[in-house]
Image: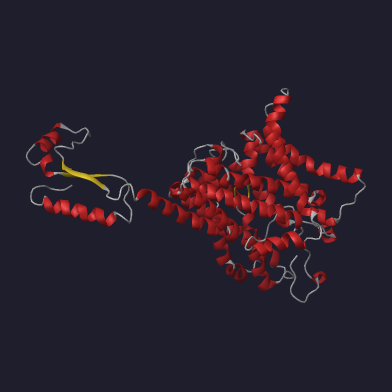
Amino acid sequence: MFCAPGRSPSTCAPPVPLLGVRLFLLSTMLGQLFLGSQKLGGTSFWSAGMMMVENIPFMHSLAFEIHDQLSSCNAQFIPTVLASFHLTTILTTLSFYLISMFKLGNVVFFFPKHVILGCVGGIGVFVVKTGLEVSTSGAMTLSSATSIVEFFTYERNPGLYLLPLLLSFGLRLFQKLLPVINTALPWLPASTASLLPPLFFLSLTPLFYLTTKSLGLSPPPCYFFPTTSTVDAAPSPLYPTYGLSLLNFPALLATIPTQISCVIFSLMHAPINIPSMSISTGVDVDMNAELRTHYLSNLFASLSFCPPNYMCYSNSIVYHRAGGRGELSSLLIVLSTSLLFFFGNSLIKYIPRLMAGTLLIHVGLDLFLEGLYDSYYAGFDALEYGSIVVIIVTMSMSGMTTGLIVGIICAALTFVVNTSPRHTNPIRGTMPATTFVSSRWRTVAARTVLDGGTGRRQIMCVQLQGHLYFANLEGFTQAVKAAVTKREGTVAVR
């Protein structure tokens, strides 16, 4: 709830409890409909779509910027905040459409595999960090070793983060022992490995209550997500809408720079998540088709007054490894999410933090190990593996945007180092067309001209090798000029 400084909350307009959660769930349902369906969305693989959770800080910024001008006691506050979210989705939809229309998605394939794996590892660290924050409601940053120590020492109840960590490592250990268990118990179904993680996470909440009840324990409120009497009592609109007559356009226009920053940040997820998913699943993708799918899902999100959505890599990996395939699986996710949309307000206070924290920590460790540990045995040279480490550290310390910039630099550096020693001279040779004949089919008249006195003898061919780039481009130009000068007056260069 937002209130102007100096005002009592009771003097402000009634709050809109958990409206942001409903916005998140509605956008997630629309994203899953398109990004998890090959028939409806045209995606190349079965994935999990969701509202862009990394954009929540931008949503907070938009709300605070409008609050600075209106305060929450103004009747225009909530409609203007909703309009700023809606306009951000419209701009994101338009951007995805333009990028896919002009086929700019193919630029992503200039990123080598080791750069993508570095981004995967960096995402894993981010997800683990989020899992710890969810478990404790703390504010952990990886900017320094001191901040990490403070995070693990200031918490008065270490069980908040120790339980999710122990449960996550316990699941990982059980997965390692599963082949031995399958050998000892051959009657176990083959799907046990894929079904184990989702069944484990679903069982955490009932096991939490059974354990505390059997031991006679009463877990403190910090083990659950916070709820207040205001949230429980105040009515919440089911569908987020606003009227144009209630908008404050000066305050809305003032948020345009933040909206543009949010759109740019939103567009940066696709170059990371889609190729990462392609590598992890072994499925070739058409990047432009995937961007069109993102355009469709965000188009319907904008028509539904929701924040933007995208293909979430970490959730998609869990979905893929659990055997999620087909339109029916995607539809079941949408239906289960719709239950939370209608009844989530009353259910969320009963879900322990450790369930969400364990899930995030487990997924994050999977991604981190895929990027750092598995890549060590993937045949990369020292420079490529060093780039993976640098990208992971950068994303962990400075965020995804900085990590992507460092990834671009590493890709360029790897290309220069690996290419320049092999083909410093891009010209393999020069020769007349009489000795280097084209294999293209030509008409009789064209062959008569080429075989005549003014034909192939007057054409000089330049055969290239390797790559043309900034380091050898000048040498290539000078070599061509020298060859033309040497043969000047005897040939016509074409």
Q: Is residue 295 left or right of residue 7?
A: left
Please name the colour scheme applied to the rendered image.
Answer: secondary structure
Above or below, comparing residue 205 to residue 193 in the picture = below
Q: Which residue is depicted at the point 62% across and 41% down? A: 317
In the orientation shown, which residue stands out farthest toward the bottom? Answer: 6
**Nearest to the observer: residue 168 or residue 221:** 168
Quadrant location, the N terminus: bottom right
Please indicate, yes or no, whether residue 237 appears anywhere in the rendered image: no
Relative height, residue 171 to residue 134 (above, below): above
Does residue 360 appear left or right of residue 91 in this picture?
A: right
Residue 261, x across and y down, in percent: 55, 62
In the rendered image, the residue lying farthest to the left is 453
Q: Is residue 255 in view?
A: yes
Furthest toward the top, the residue is 187
Position of residue 485 in the picture relative to residue 400 (left or right): left
> In terms of depth relative to the viewer, which is nearer, 182 or 231?
182
Using residue 379 as the reference point, say whether residue 298 is left or right of it. Answer: right
x, y percentage for residue 303? 61, 51
Instruction: Work out whether residue 485 or residue 65 is closer to the camera in this orientation and state it.
Output: 485
| Residue lying at 74% horizontally and 59% vertically, measured from the top left | 152
- Residue 316 point in image, percent of width and height: 62, 42
Q: What is the residue that sits farthest to the front in this orientation?
A: 382
Closer-to-camera residue (193/376):
376
For the point 49% across and 38% down, which residue is it? 284
Q: Which x, y percent locates residue 93?
A: 54, 53
Number of numbered callouts drawn = 0
Compared to residue 461, the image places residue 60 above or below, namely below
